[in-house]
Amino acid sequence: MRATLGIDLGGSAIKAGAVDAAAGKVVGEVQSVPTPPGAPLAATRDALATLVARFPECGGAVGLAFPSVIKHGVAHTATNVAQAWIGTDAAALLTAAAGRPGYVVNDADAAGMAEMRAGAGRGERGVVMMLTFGTGIGTALFVDGRLWPNTELGHLEVDGQEAEHRASARTRTVERLDWPAWCERVNRVLERYHALLWPDLYIIGGGVSERFEEFGDLLRAPARIVPAQLRQTAGVVGAALYAADAAGR
Ligand code: BGC
């Protein structure tokens, strides 16, 4: 079976990889280009076309994990990308850039789908919440393995501020927080999520999850807390899974 191309647009890089959708993993190298500052439409479309051209072995549909509410391919919010994305048919833009069918999904939802299929959430029932800590905080919610899309709980107010302004990985870097100080903030966020949704399991993802052994013991919640397993490739894998599923429907 041919691999499906998955692309993940993050705050600093756009990553792409050929994904074996059945196995839920990247085959070969992940390639990346810098995210054009502010991710304006035209420059982003060009960057997507550049990445697609590097994977001639991938056929069929292309998936993109994008940091915005996405409904039927259209972006509805733009927190860390250009405002012009709001109302833009991101799937049509991707299709034009790739020259073949493009499907777009929220980035945290993509990462969560990948973890549920092939990572830390495999076989998990009940309420599972995937959190991606990066430029913002992404959230993906699953009930008995089924996604509730676009939960966007990184924007929930916690102690008078949006959760992602207090506790994203970027905030940790910008404010030079050590692990205990950052985890104290994350724990407040988890407490708020718990009061709303009572998850059974939190999966901690995003780039920072690669250092989970340095801070994981400091996290507290009345639920299990585990690191993501696909780490930096979760968004790429999830985007490809989404595209493969959507193209097959
Ligand atoms: C965006 C979400 C995204 C998250 C992680 C937030 O600012 O609103 O759509 O999932 O950042 O990238």
Image (tube, helix red, strand yellow):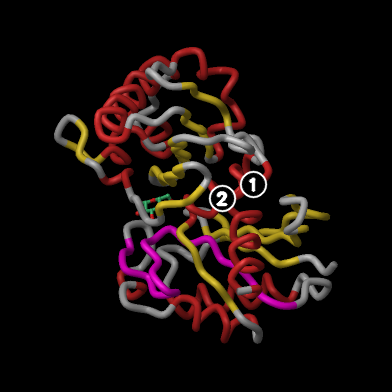
Numbered mark located on residue 113 in the image: 2
Comparing 249 with 186, the one in front is 249
> Residue 76 location in percent, x, y?
32, 68
Badge 1 element = helix
Label 2, label 1: how far apart the Cα atoms are: 6 Å
- Please state which of residues 171 and 111 is positioned toward the viewer in this rendering: 111
- Of the pair 119 and 179, the residue shown nearer to us: 119
Residue 210 in the image: state x and y as whole percent: 61, 31
Boundaries of the magenta span: 60-78
Q: Residue at x 57, y 35 (%)?
A: 124
User: Magenta includes 100?
Assistant: no
Picture coordinates of residue 31 (x, y %)?
A: 72, 59
Tell me: 60 left or right of 212: right
- Give the residue number, with chain letter if any, for mark 1: 117
Quick one: SS at disc 2?
helix
Where, quadrant-wise, is the N terminus in this rendering? bottom right
